[in-house]
Image (spheres, rainbow, N blue to C red):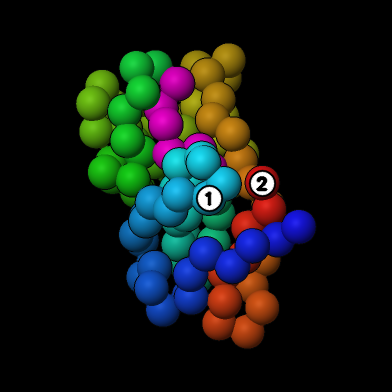
Amino acid sequence: DFVKIATAAEIGPGSVRKFDVAGKEIAVYNVDGSFFATSNICPHQGGPLDEGILEGNSIVCPWHAWAFDVTTGVSPINPRAKIDCYPVKLEGADILIKL
């Protein structure tokens, strides 16, 4: 089931916000008006991805600069490194995700 987590206006273009959903830390990204959701935890050493830098569709972890494509979860540097991705849909102005 999809769960409403925010409205589109709450996450501006080029930004990321963290949400706690069903006990999981989820990062939601706005990439040029399209929304994506991933785990907020970097698999390297647990860094908070929502505090990183969103460059295009790549999130860069603030702790050790590991990068991940928010559309696929895969690291462009090391394809074996991956973060979980979650389906996102818009209903009107509402952002919904499915865990």
Q: Is residue 28 magenta?
A: no
Residue 88, position as x, y percentages in the image: 64, 59
Q: Is residue 17 visible?
A: yes
Secondary structure beneath dot 2 equals loop
Identified at 32% across, 35% down, the residue is 48
State the extent of the magenta-drawn residues as a range.
38-43
Q: Which residue is mark 1?
A: 21
- Note whether residue 70 is visible: no
Q: Is residue 93 left or right of residue 62?
A: right
* Left or right of 69 on screen, residue 55: left
Magenta: main secondary structure equals loop
Q: Is residue 85 above or below residue 20?
A: above
Seen in the picture, residue 59 relative to 32 is either above or below; the reply is above
The answer to which of marks 2 and 1 sits earlier in the sequence is 1
Farthest residue to the right: give it.
1
Query: Do the numbered discs 2 and 1 sit on residues whose CB atoms are within 8 Å?
Result: yes
Q: Residue furthest bottom?
A: 92
Camera-nearest residue between 31 and 44: 44
Q: Give the spatial CA distance, label 2 vs label 1.
A: 8 Å
- Give neighbour class at mark 1: few <14, some 14-19, many 20+ (Cα, 10 Å): some
Type of amino acid at the residue the image marks with label 2: Leu
Q: Which residue has dot 2 on it?
A: 99
Work out whether residue 91 or residue 68 is closer to the camera in this orientation and state it.
91
* Residue located at (38% from left, 51% from top): 18
